[in-house]
């Protein structure tokens, strides 16, 4: 295996990791901003008021995006495992 092949495999792995994490991180960020704004407007500083809705939004996003994430991960795994003979040289 040559150095450019290793660089390409690592680049693909980081790219897949980015795309798999992006929807959940985006939902978490948006939920965090909205809950923080709501806390500022209502002057409620209870930690449960901020944590529970964020966790619920994250869990909902996980259930919504899980099929897409599994599809992407399976597609990537098949592409890596399908070319093992090329990588073993």
Image (tube, helix red, strand yellow):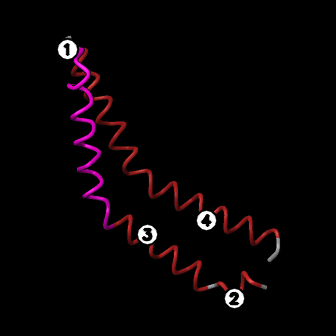
Q: Which residues are magenta?
A: 44-67
First in sequence, mark 2 or 1: give its number: 1
SS under mark 4:
helix
Residue at horizontal 25 percent and vertical 15 percent from the top: 40
Q: Which mark is residue 44?
A: 1
| Crowd class of label 2 (few under 14; some 14 to 19; many from 20; radius 10 Å) | few
**Residue sitting at the far bottom:** 85
Disc 2 designates what residue? Answer: 85
First in sequence, mark 4 or 3: give its number: 4
Up-down: is 78 above or below 4?
A: below
Q: Position of residue 51 (x, y in %)?
A: 27, 30
Rounded to the nearest angstrom, the CA distance separating label 2 from label 1 is 59 Å
Residue at horizontal 55 percent and vertical 80 percent from the top: 79
Rounded to the nearest angstrom, the CA distance separating label 4 from label 2 is 18 Å
- 53 part of magenta stretch: yes
Residue 81, picture quadrant: bottom right
First in sequence, mark 3 or 2: give its number: 3
Q: Position of residue 45 (x, y in %)?
A: 24, 14
């Amino acid at each position: 295996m040559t150095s450019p092949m290793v660089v390409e495999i690592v680049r693909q792995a980081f790219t897949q990791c980015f795309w798999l994490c992006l929807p959940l991180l985006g939902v978490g960020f948006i939920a965090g901003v909205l809950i923080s704004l709501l806390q500022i407007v209502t002057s409620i500083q209870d930690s449960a008021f901020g944590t529970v809705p964020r966790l619920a939004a994250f869990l909902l996003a996980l259930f919504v995006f899980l099929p897409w994430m599994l599809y992407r991960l399976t597609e990537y795994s098949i592409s890596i495992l399908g070319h093992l003979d090329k990588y073993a040289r």
